[in-house]
């Protein structure tokens, strides 16, 4: 092997990977995913049950009648109907569809997440407000 080929091979092996693909769920009835492996997830299927562990950057849910449980996500995007999502910590919730339910426990970087909801019958709720004494 020539010296140039060896140098090129070493450079490729030592350089960090710059292309990162999203994790895509295109079919199936559900799965558990660790966002430490890939923090951007696309669920493009219906009638499944998914669990996302760790710190997710973005979760895009495109489908209907899907149940999702999330530990932590910066941005949650829902496009569809009759989805049920429970999330422990979230910064932004975007819902476009009908009869979706999102229950969040806390905001990641503030008291509560921002929520943009378009459609009918959607419910986005957090913990009850603390009573002032």
Image (tube, helix red, strand yellow):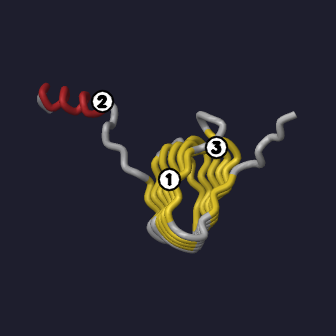
Secondary structure of the residue carrying numbered label 1: strand
The image shows residue 15 at horizontal and vertical percentages of 30, 30
| Residue at horizontal 61 percent and vertical 48 percent from the top | 53
**C-alpha distance separating marks 1 and 3:** 13 Å
Q: Which residue is mark 2?
A: 15
Q: Nearer the viewer, residue 6 or 113?
A: 113
Using the rendered image of the protein, determine whether residue 3 is visible from the camera's viewpoint: yes
Q: Residue at x 50, y 68 (%)?
A: 97
Q: CA distance from mark 1 to mark 2?
A: 28 Å
Q: Are marks 1 and 3 in contact (CB under 8 Å)?
A: no
Label 3 SS: strand
For label 3, the residue is 89
Q: Is residue 102 above or below residue 112?
A: below
- Compared to residue 48, the image places residue 68 above or below, namely above
Mark 1: few, some, or many residues within 10 Å (few <14, many ≥20)?
A: many
Query: Residue 6's spot in the image, x, y percent?
Result: 19, 29
Of callouts 1 and 2, which one flags the residue occurring earlier in the amino acid sequence?
A: 2
Q: Between disc 1 and disc 3, whose residue precedes? A: 1
């Amino acid at each position: 092997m020539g010296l140039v080929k060896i140098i090129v091979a070493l450079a490729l092996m030592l350089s960090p990977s710059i292309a990162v693909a999203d994790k895509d769920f295109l079919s199936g009835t559900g799965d558990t995913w660790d966002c430490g492996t890939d923090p951007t997830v696309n669920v493009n299927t219906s009638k499944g049950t998914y669990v996302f562990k760790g710190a997710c950057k973005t979760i895009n849910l495109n489908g209907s009648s899907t149940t999702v449980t999330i530990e932590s996500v910066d941005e949650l995007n829902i496009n569809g109907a009759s989805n049920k999502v429970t999330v422990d910590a979230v910064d932004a919730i975007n819902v476009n569809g009908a009869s979706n339910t999102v229950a969040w426990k806390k905001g990641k970087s503030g008291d509560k997440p921002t929520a943009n909801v378009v459609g009918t019958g959607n419910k986005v709720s957090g913990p009850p407000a603390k009573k002032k004494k």
